[in-house]
Image (tube, rainbow, N blue to C red):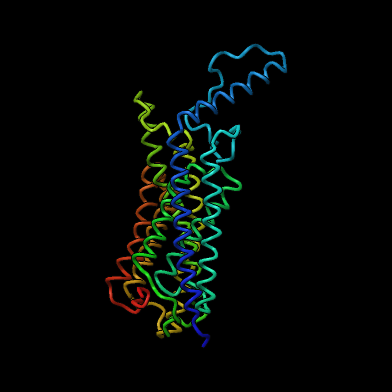
Amino acid sequence: MPSINEQLGAYSDLFMLLAAFAYAVGFIAFAWDLAKSNSTIRELEAGLLEAEARQLATVGGPAPVKNAGKPAAGALVSESMDYVTDTGKRKAAKVAVSVAWIGVAIHAVAVVSRAIAAARVPWGNMYEFLTTGAFIVALVFMVALLRKDLRFMGTFVMLLVTIMLCAATMGFPTPVAHLVPALQSPWLVIHVSIAVLASALFTITFAMSVLQLIQDGRQKRLAAGGEDKLAFMRLVPSAVALENAAYRVNAVSFVMWTFTVMAGAVWAEAAWGRYWGWDTKEVWSFVIWVVYAGYLHARATRGWTGARSAWLSIIGYLCIIFNFTVVNLYFNGLHSYAGV
């Protein structure tokens, strides 16, 4: 059995803390971008009006009426979440994206060094599952930013990633070590890797669903003639756009979670001689599957849209959190080793 490199493991822990610090700075920068949204929106709208005036002048059309063509609330991010011309005004958001990329790079070094130090895949306990999951969340979000304007989610995603890393380093600190015998199987790579990826994607859709509920409430308040108390939400797409995006990602994540449950059953048969034994961890993994299956079915066939679908998505993610924390820590079973 390969030896443990404890010094490299210590460096990995240090890199995790540095990554958490970078994500925290990114969170502050993204939050600052939202906090100054009123001035940002005015600057963006002025730039759009100026561009429209130049276009009309070029074709010899009439001079634009004051405030003509003013984007509607939420129009600064298109319904397809593509980038719109921002004339370089969102400097805080650009700083946030740059810092977040630095955090992802440091985080990658931390995860890889942990794997090298342990001479195995870095998801053999709660600390490693959480730190690797946080890395996948951040990486998926940052890669998506290359194609779609998801900067409005930056505050929420960076906050979640920071909380995940802090929870791992302070709540579940685990020295680098060999796997317990029950985990020494090729199925660890297959079963747990897909579970980590699915959980990371569910984390992103959780953030989308929370934003959907906020935007839905804001839109209803404006439609009733109320005051816009959440001006920063004008930088966020409509509730319908958020719902559609969350539904598509949840559909992919659900397929991954289905494979996770099936691969776990095959591993259980190889390890314990039965595919299913109603162990607490197995039960809650199935509960998660049922909740998201209900979410997809209700939205696709029963017309459960809007706030109801968002709440189902949120409930599914809360089940994931319960499964990872409470079930691992407080319920005895064949999966109790997951809490080490």
Residue at image point 47% right, 36% down:
238
Q: Position of residue 43 (x, y in %)?
A: 53, 27
Asked if residue 131 is positioned above or below residue 210 in the image, the reply reads below
- Judged left or right of residue 299, residue 103 is right
- Judged left or right of residue 22, residue 217 is left
> Is residue 228 visible in the rendered structure shown here?
yes
Residue at image point 38% right, 77% down:
276
Asked if residue 255 is positioned above or below residue 44 in the image, the reply reads below
Q: Position of residue 34 (x, y in %)?
A: 45, 37
Residue at image point 53% right, 23% down:
70
> Is residue 301 visible in the rendered structure shown here?
no
The total of numbered circles placed on residues is 0
Q: Position of residue 31 (x, y in %)?
A: 43, 42
Q: Nearer the viewer, residue 232 or 175?
A: 175
Q: Residue furthest top?
A: 62
Asked if residue 12 is positioned above or below residue 295 in the image, the reply reads below
Image quarter of residue 182? bottom left
Q: Residue furthest right?
A: 59
Q: Nearer the viewer, residue 38 or 77?
A: 38
Q: Position of residue 128 (x, y in %)?
A: 44, 69
Q: Quadrant of the C terminus?
A: bottom left
